[in-house]
Each structure stands twice: as C-alpha cells, then as structure tokens.
C-alpha cells in the first residue's frame, strides 16, 4: 500500500482504530498491526504523536511479558517467533525517533520513554538473538545522534555529585546526602533536559550517571564477542562505543580506565584464541583512531594502553599475519603520529616492541630448558596439538559431507517442483 492510496482514504481514523483492535488479538495479528503502525508513522510524521501513548504502553507491556527460554526443548519455533515479535516492537520505536523526533521532548511521553529505554537496555541490548541486539543498538545510536557529547556533558555536570566533578574520581557509590541533593534537582529540572540525560540520571539513584555510561560501554564491548557479526552491526556498535567513551573522557573522571582495559582484553583474547578472526581487533582499532582524531589532548595518559594493540598487529609473525588488519594498524599508527607528540609516540612504541621481543626470547629459552630437563611435557604438548588439528580436520570434512548432502536434497526437491510445474 503506497502513500498516495492511503492519503486518499477518507476515514483514515477508522482504519487506524481497526489496526488498534488487532493489537489485542492473537500474536500474528499483533505483528501485522506493528508493521502497519510503521507505515502510518512514515506517512503522518508528527501528526501521529497523538497515538503514541497507547502504542508505547502496548510495547512496554509486550516486552515485559516475553521472556527468553534457554531450554532446548520443542519451543525453538515459538522462540524464533517471539524474537521476531520483539524485533517488530523495537522497530516501531526506531521509526518513531526517525519520523516523530518531537515525541522525545513531549512531557506526557517522558515517563513512558524512560520505561522503554530501561527495558531495551536491560532486556534487548544483550539479547541472544542477533537481530534484536542490532535493532537495540540502532535505537540507542539514533538517541545519541540527537545531541553532541560536549552538550550532554555540559548538561550532565549539573546533576553529578561533587565526587564525580573531580578529575580524580574513582568512587562508585555516593554518600546519602549528595544523592538527596541530587534528587531535588532531578525533580525540578530533568523534564526539560535531553532524554538520555534524564535516563542515566534517574536509572539508579544509588550510583553515578557516569557509572551507567560505563556499563553501556561494557554492553557495547560484549556485543563484539560473537564472530558472525555483520559489518553494519559492527559499525553501529563502534559508533555507540565512541560516543559513550567521549562522554567519559570529557567528564575528566577515571571511569574510562576500565573501558580501555576491557577493550584491551578483547583484542588479546581474539589474538591468542582466534587469530584467524579479526572482528574485535579491527573494531577496537577503529575506535582508538576515532578517539585520537577528536580528543588526542585528553588521551596522553592512555597511550601506553593503546599502542600495544597497534604494535602487536604491525609486528606480528608472518605465519599468523592478516594483511588487512596490519594495514589498518599502520593507518591508526599514522593517525597517532599526526595528532600526538611524535617523539613520545615513537619512544613508547620502541619500549613496547623491546618488551615484547624480550618476553618472546625468555619464553623460547624456557621451552628449550624444559625440552632438555622434562622432554615428556614437550612431547605431551605436541601430541595435544596434533590431535586437536586432526579433530578440527575431521569436523571440517564432516561438515562438507553434510552440506553436500543438503545441496543434493535441495536440487532433487527443486527438480521435482519444476517437473510438477511442467505437468
């Protein structure tokens, strides 16, 4: 149904009422109703604001009711349908932000927006289904696009306790008196602030808003863990992580330290356990480059944490090298040279390379001594490697045989259907 045909309907309100009836019907009709809501939102834009309270209440109720079941019983089909249903629910919210941006500022909708934000944050950002995670990440990305990090921090400073306004802040829970003062300011001013500030400030009054931002950073890091991520999903995760990291850096607190450590662990884990995969390392390298481009003056103290990630990929052995990753690491290193003190960068880089070579040499010497003193341990390690390699080879062969069988079955089914069509 196109825009022209809907605009010609004289009783469009009646059509909408008909769709609203479907949201109280069985789940298949509810899915269809959600897709029709998206169509109406695309056409009516801001005029659709009057219906948003009912739709938001319905979405909140539905996301609350659906729970993920880890049991591998005969509920796989039902679980897939539930995941698809959550996908449609979040998709409606994304279209509301795109086509009805003023709804984020409407006071009557503020409380329900906060509830929906909390639900998507807690239930959907790390949902087992990859497309639910992707849409949740997009939802937060659209929310972040509405305000620059500098503006958010400028507004947020009014609601931070004194401990967080100090540059040496490491506290995680504030004392009662500061939170009481914060409560009073929240009551009077937050309704006029951007929605994201309202959310992180009122999410949990026992913790700092900066800790909430830090936790969202950790969520972004956790989303990078699966190896089957699409390029679009990776890009959205990194955009969100860059935005949230900028908030922590500009706040001049120490909450960014743990985010850097988490990202460093991600790259180390992938480099040692899955050297053939490059998703996490390439994403983290892009994140580092973006931060250095915009906020190099704030990041001098983090150079010793960033440069080992770059040096490891540039100086990697030829046996485990990935050319695209090495090129990316060299490009990021060039960004460092242009935006930071080159003498400082080269000296830190040289120290890191020297330390890595020394550790490698010490490891080789230890293995040589072990081979002489306890050869049975070295033999056992070699046998384990061989059996693991053989096991992986067997798995690959079995998969290839299964795929070949599936392809043959598909071909035979297609041939039968073609013959039936000819008949």
Image: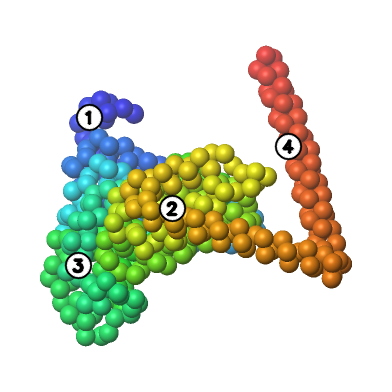
- Residue wearing tag 1: 7
Nearer the N terminus, badge 4 or badge 3?
3
| For discs 2 and 4, the disc positioned in front in the rendered view | 2
Q: Quadrant of residue 319?
A: top right
Q: Is residue 422 above or below residue 119?
A: above
Nearer the N terminus, badge 2 or badge 4?
2
Q: CA distance from mark 4 to mark 3?
A: 58 Å
Q: Which mark is residue 346?
A: 2
Q: CA distance from mark 1 to mark 4?
A: 50 Å
| For discs 4 and 3, the disc positioned in front in the rendered view | 3
Horizontal and vertical percent for residue 172? 35, 77
- Residue wearing tag 4: 403
- The single residue placed furthest to the top in the displayed view is 422
| For discs 1 and 3, the disc positioned in front in the rendered view | 3
Residue at 45%, 58% (x, y): give it: 348
What is the secondary structure assignment of the residue under circle 2? helix
Towards the viewer: 410 or 356: 356
Q: Which mark is residue 157?
A: 3
Quick one: quadrant of the C terminus?
top right
Do the residues bearing badges 3 and 2 touch, measured as CB atoms within 8 Å? no
Q: CA distance from mark 3 to mark 2?
A: 36 Å
């Amino acid at each position: 149904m196109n825009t022209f045909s809907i605009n010609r309907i004289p009783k469009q309100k009646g059509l909408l009422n008909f769709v609203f009836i479907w949201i109280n019907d069985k789940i298949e009709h509810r899915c269809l109703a959600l897709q029709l809501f998206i169509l109406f939102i695309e056409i009516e834009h801001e005029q659709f604001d009057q219906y948003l309270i009912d739709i938001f209440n319905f979405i909140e109720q539905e996301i609350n009711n659906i729970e993920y079941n880890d049991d591998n019983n005969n509920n796989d089909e039902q679980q897939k349908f539930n995941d698809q249903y959550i996908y449609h629910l979040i998709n409606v919210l994304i279209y509301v932000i795109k086509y009805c941006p003023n709804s984020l500022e409407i006071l009557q909708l503020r409380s329900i927006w906060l509830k929906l934000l909390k639900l998507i944050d807690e239930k959907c950002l790390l949902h087992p289904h990859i497309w639910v995670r992707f849409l949740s990440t997009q939802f937060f990305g659209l929310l972040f696009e509405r305000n620059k990090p500098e503006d958010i921090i400028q507004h947020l400073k009014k609601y931070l306790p004194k401990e967080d306004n100090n540059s040496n802040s490491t506290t995680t829970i504030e004392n009662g008196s500061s939170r009481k003062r914060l409560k009073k300011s929240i009551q009077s001013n937050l309704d006029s602030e951007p929605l994201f500030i309202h959310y992180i400030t009122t999410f949990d009054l026992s913790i700092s808003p900066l800790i909430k931002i830090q936790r969202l950073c950790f969520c972004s890091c956790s989303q990078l863990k699966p190896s089957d991520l699409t390029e679009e999903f990776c890009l959205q995760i990194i955009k969100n992580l860059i935005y949230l990291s900028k908030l922590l850096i500009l706040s001049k607190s120490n909450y960014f330290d743990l985010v850097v450590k988490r990202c460093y662990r991600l790259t180390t884990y992938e480099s040692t356990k899955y050297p053939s995969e490059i998703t996490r390392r390439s994403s983290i390298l892009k994140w580092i480059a973006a931060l250095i481009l915009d906020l190099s003056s704030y990041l001098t103290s983090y150079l010793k944490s960033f440069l080992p990630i770059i040096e490891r990929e540039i100086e990697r052995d030829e046996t485990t090298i990935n050319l695209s990753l090495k090129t990316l690491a060299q490009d990021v290193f060039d960004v460092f040279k242009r935006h930071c003190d080159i003498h400082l960068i080269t000296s830190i880089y040289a120290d890191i390379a020297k330390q890595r070579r020394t550790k490698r040499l010490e490891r080789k010497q230890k293995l040589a001594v072990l081979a002489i003193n306890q050869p049975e341990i070295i033999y056992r390690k070699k046998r384990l490697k061989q059996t693991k390699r053989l096991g992986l080879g067997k798995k690959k062969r079995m998969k290839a045989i299964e795929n070949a069988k599936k392809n043959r079955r598909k071909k035979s089914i297609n041939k039968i259907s073609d013959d039936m069509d000819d008949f």
